[in-house]
Amino acid sequence: MQKLSEFFDIKPGVTALIGGGGKTSTMYALAEELRQSASVVLCTSTHILRPPQYPYFPRLVAELKPGDVVSAGTIDGAKLSMPEQNFSELMRYADFVLVEADGSRQLPLKAHASHEPVIPKEANTVLVVIGIDGLGKRICEVAHRPELYAKKCRTSVEEIVTEEMIRTVVSTYPRCDGIVINKADDPEQLRKAKSLAEQFSVPVAITAWHSANEPIKAYRRRL
């Protein structure tokens, strides 16, 4: 299976992740791929839990080596917030800067308020993450900012999420260069993910990050 970073043509510099649940797992997967030949710094423009498996630095002061993966930012309780250094400065120390630029409270779907997402201006690529486990459930159960999600779909928070609703809300996102549909953990969820992928014109990867066997399930790219 092709690497995720190759499929989305992730270039050196800043890559941002926005949308629903699965952003952190996607960021970790990209970091592990990219570290094979480059250095990577993980950070956020909002708030994330500090990645426990990687060294943490409040500031980067020396160029990282190929194979290095570190997190950088400001400690805010148990969370990591935006780094003191701007993203252009971080790019001087690492080949790749992966930024979680949105929050979803681990819910599979997300509608953005006016101040969201916080996409760095330096971003080469913006990946949107969608949890397929949100499809077929009530908006109020699976969407972060459910009232706003329902408003964008011209419906109520009690309505069942459809493929068309997901496509409609994603179309309101400020930028989408590729989509990761996550939580395709069984054959039925994989079938639903493949069907949903047909709603989009950008490249789509289908994943199941908690699967020990083949976490990348499929790719779809329209010609």
Image (tube, rainbow, N blue to C red):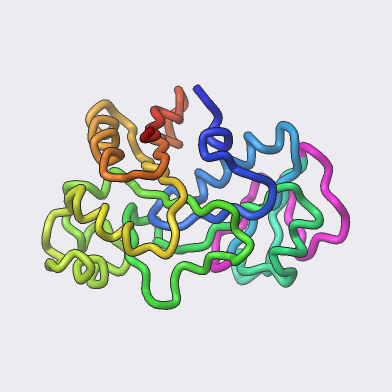
At a point 40% along the width and 34% down the height, the residue shown is 221
* Magenta region, main secondary structure: loop
Q: Nearer the viewer, residue 112 or 144?
A: 112
At a point 33% along the width and 32% down the height, the residue shown is 185
Considering every residue shown, the one lying at the far bottom of the view is 114
Q: Nearer the viewer, residue 56 or 196?
A: 196
Which quadrant, please, contains the C terminus?
top left
Query: Residue 99: in sight, yes or no?
Result: yes
* 201 to the left or right of 95: left
- Tell me where residue 154 appears, x and y as whole percent: 15, 68
- Tell me where residue 204 appears, x and y as whole percent: 40, 39
At a point 12% along the width and 66% down the height, the residue shown is 155
- Tell me where residue 203 appears, x and y as whole percent: 42, 40
* 143 to the left or right of 204: left
* 220 to the left or right of 198: right
Q: Is residue 63 magenta?
A: yes
Position above or below: 62 against 2: below
Query: Residue 78: in sight, yes or no?
Result: no
Considering every residue shown, the one lying at the far right of the view is 62
Considering every residue shown, the one lying at the far front of the view is 223
Q: Which residues are magenta?
A: 45-67
Q: Nearer the viewer, residue 150 or 79?
A: 150
Position above or below: 182 against 168: above
Q: Is residue 59 magenta?
A: yes
At a point 74% along the width and 47% down the height, the residue shown is 95
- Tell me where residue 82 appears, x and y as whole percent: 63, 69
- Which image quarter: residue 104? bottom left
* 124 to the left or right of 162: right
